[in-house]
Amino acid sequence: MRDRPRRWDPRVWNATPEEVAADYPCDRHMTVPFRSFVRAVDVAAPVPVVYRWLCQFKVAPYSYDLVDNLGRRSPRTLTPGAQELAPGQKFLIFEVVEFVADEHLTGVIAERHRRSYGDVAVTYRVAPTAGGTRLVGRLDVGATTVFERARRAALAVGDALMGRKQLLTIKALAEETAGAE
């Protein structure tokens, strides 16, 4: 008997069951019922290099720049000072609510984006591995009404594409940086 092909799930890309089930800092910033979207990638670079590239989210989205950055290319070199984080700073469509250098960067949706996206929180987490770093992005999206659940389903598909591209771009840039050191 042939194995049935796995159905594509837009909520998860390349994450282990343990990563999907784990608690993340973004969870404690949700005030309504939520579902999580989890993306992950292995990076052949040390944790500090990968984390430093995450700080670049203050500068640009590192996804599909035509869509996310009005056609401007996300910088391919580190921006001086971007690693200096503080609560309330903008990154992507979020505001920093907490961070631990070389561990995680966590944010909640900025007020000006709340109407479009609803109640959303995100954590980008880095952890050392034998080959470098495991980078996990977790997006928690809340919903209490039928409209919000429909919006969340649409966001899952969009984030499946954009989040994957974002992590792969950070991976490539961090590996390039690590190779140059």
Image: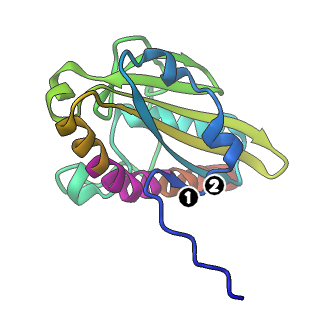
Residue 73 coordinates in the image, percent (x, y): 29, 55
Residue 85 coordinates in the image, percent (x, y): 46, 18
Residue at 71% from the left image edge and 36% from the top image edge: 127
Residue sitting farthest toward the right: 130
The label number, if any, that marks residue 175 in the structure image: 2
Q: Nearer the viewer, residue 155 or 54?
A: 155
Residue at 36% from the left image edge and 50% from the top image edge: 156
Residue 68 coordinates in the image, percent (x, y): 25, 50
Cα gap from disc 2 to disc 1, whole angstroms: 5 Å
Magenta portion: prevailing SS class: helix
The amino acid type of the residue labelled 1 equals Ala
Q: Nearer the viewer, residue 154 or 137?
A: 154
The amino acid type of the residue labelled 2 equals Glu
Give the magenta part as a residue range: 154-167
Tags 2 and 1 touching, CB below 8 Å: yes
Q: Is residue 104 magenta?
A: no
User: Label 1 belongs to which residue?
Assistant: 172
Whether residue 181 is visible: no
Q: Tell whether 93 sits left or right of 56.
A: left
Q: Mark 1: give few (<14), some (14-19) or many (20+) Cα within 10 Å.
A: some
